[in-house]
Image (cartoon, helix red, strand yellow):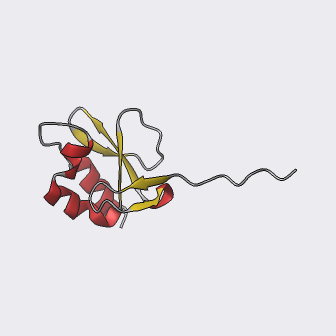
Amino acid sequence: MVPAPRSIPIRSCIACRNRENWTELLHLVEIDGQVIPDPDRKLDGRGAWLHRRCFDVAVQRRSFSRAFKSEKDLSTEKLEQFLSESH
């Protein structure tokens, strides 16, 4: 008996809202008012997904506050640092 093929989870980018295979997106979590990159997808907490190329669009659209249901602006400093180091 052949096992059924596993489906690959699909997630939406918080900036461009395009649906994508989850391996193509960066997982993010919010901890203490900061947006933290979670490339290993192991951190606890409310998560969001982002194309690396969509960071500027997410900032313009205030996508982080909406995705993490926060009424205040969230710090993206650690995410910016991660993205600049990974290029």
**Going 22% across and 47% down the picture, which residue do you hit?**
64
Q: Is residue 44 left or right of residue 67?
A: right
Q: Is residue 28 left or right of residue 8?
A: left
Which quadrant would residue 67 be assigned to in this image? top left
Position above or below: 72 against 6: above
Q: Is residue 29 left or right of residue 75?
A: right
Which quadrant would residue 83 be assigned to in this image? bottom left
Q: Quadrant of the C terminus?
A: bottom left
Residue 65, given in percent of the width and then of the height, sits at: 19, 44
**Going 13% across and 36% down the picture, which residue do you hit?**
71
Residue 49, given in percent of the width and then of the height, sits at: 36, 51
Disc count in the image?
0
**Going 35% across and 61% down the picture, which residue do you hit?**
51
**Going 18% across and 44% down the picture, which residue do you hit?**
75
Q: Residue furthest left?
A: 72
Position above or below: 24 against 64: below
Position above or below: 54 against 82: below
Q: Is residue 14 left or right of residue 44?
A: left
Front residue of 56/62: it is: 62
Front residue of 61/41: it is: 61
Position above or below: 58 against 45: below
Front residue of 45/21: it is: 21
Residue 15, given in percent of the width and then of the height, sits at: 26, 58
